[in-house]
Amino acid sequence: MANVVIVGAQWGDEGKGKVVDLYTEFADTVVRFGGGANAGHTLVVGGQKVITHLVPSGVLRGRGKRCVLGDGMVIDPQTLLEEMKELRSRGLLSDDRDLIIGERAHVILPTHKLLDGLREQGKGALGTTRRGIGPAYESKMSRRGVRMRDLLSAPRLRERIAHQLEETGPILAQLGGTVPDVDALTTQYLAYGEALRPHIQDATRVLSEEIQRGQHVLFEGAQGALLDIDHGTYPYVTSSTTLAAGACVSCGVGPTAISSVIGIAKAYTTRVGAGPFPTELHGDQGEHLRQAGAEFGATTGRPRRCGWLDIAALRLAVRLNGMAGLALTKLDVLAGQRKLKVCVGYKLTPEAGGSGVSETYDELPLDPEDIVRAVPIYEELDGWDAELKNVREVEDLPPSAKRYVRRIETLLGIDCCLISVGPGRAETIMLKNPFR
């Protein structure tokens, strides 16, 4: 039995979809444990691009791989049903038993999406995907949320929606939005509940039984460690925990059941939306990485900000998650660069009116004001010209690419278990398998 948590180690978009898809070959059950439809996973299988938003990307392995949406998620039923329809058109999810939806997961309503969008139009916009994720978690924490199980009972659903609108209705009206009719919303979401009824279950019990039977379970994270609501670059973060420990909380699984944690990081760094980014590249260099890596959001299509690999930020992610190994993605994108830089720490310039003494950090500081003052300390390494997509053994990498990988391992104190050299399944160097 092996129960493995896969998490992003940067600001999201690290290639979790491909890595989860690869490791699902060895897992029996794949679980999404946080976030919502703001997390788009792009996979290339058989030359075809497939994007999932809610269903775990392990679904592409076909029948017999059970997919679970954990109770810690916030789910837009309309988006989920559309995604299920698309997957079924590809011959997937043909058996209702292949998809389990946690009955305690919270529901995203149109009011959440409307509120999210209105806030993003104003001062202090955070660059959210406007999918209603944050407002849905707010409703959850204020104990006014609607849960998936509520969609199966008309009286309870109407009561829960009315209770929530008592709070969100005046806020929407104040921001210029329209408050929906309670009865119309209840009718709409009851229909969603009926369509999803075969899948809505006690996911914690299902997972417990799977683990007791000795099945392999893969817990799939969303976003990245640096976007964690508690430990990320607040306030420029997501609305839930993105760390490995969140798998236990979301899924009702004790921490002693987890075998290992694998982090995923690109061979460079990207960030989408607002927020500090010390190693960001502007101008031609940043644009080259964006185009070479196809760095555009799977959910929004927004261009991602690109920069050099930030080891100091990765050190923080390794520590917060207790990572046992690193899956390094998009190494191929760096081909053609004469020189590469990696940030190994920061020098913080003195604050105005301060002592005038600079401070040095070997991890990403989490105070936004400190990050603004952070000047990266770089190491420079040789680049390479050769394409990597046909490389399947680490020994066959160009010498400078091999040194780049080894330097990352040395600086982080953990080994790479996988190196991705292209978007396709086969374009991968497998070094260690956490399920064996």
Image (cartoon, grey):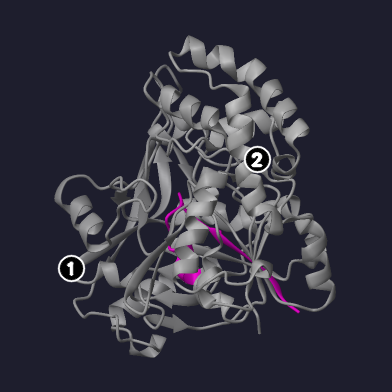
Is 339 contained in the magenta span?
A: no
For this view, does 219 lie left or right of residue 225? Answer: right
For this view, does 5 lie left or right of residue 274? Answer: right
Residue labelled with disc 1: 338
Which of the two residues, 223 or 396, is positioned nearer the viewer here? 223
Task: Locate residue 244: give its quadrant.
Answer: bottom right
Give the secondary structure at mark 2: helix
The image position of residue 216, as x and y in percent, is 71, 76
Identity, as a three-letter code, of the amino acid under mark 1: Arg
Q: Is residue 288 something that shows in the picture? A: yes
The image position of residue 18, as x and y in percent, is 45, 70
Which of the two residues, 241 or 314, is positioned nearer the viewer here? 241
Q: Residue at x 57, y 11 (%)?
A: 170
The image position of residue 73, as x and y in percent, is 63, 47
Where are the magenta residues, as a range? Answer: 1-19
**Foreground: disc 1 or disc 2:** 2
- Cα separation, mark 1 vs mark 2, equals 58 Å
Q: Is residue 144 something that shows in the picture? A: no
Q: Which mark is residue 108?
A: none
Q: Earlier in the sequence, mark 1 or mark 2?
A: 2
Identity, as a three-letter code, of the amino acid under mark 2: Leu
User: Relative to 69, is 172 above or below?
Assistant: above
The image position of residue 33, as x and y in percent, is 64, 54
Residue labelled with disc 2: 190
Give the secondary structure at mark 1: loop
Outermost left residue? 284
Label 2 near label 1: C-beta < 8 Å?
A: no
Which of the two residues, 234 or 212, is positioned nearer the viewer here? 212
Marks counted in the figure total 2
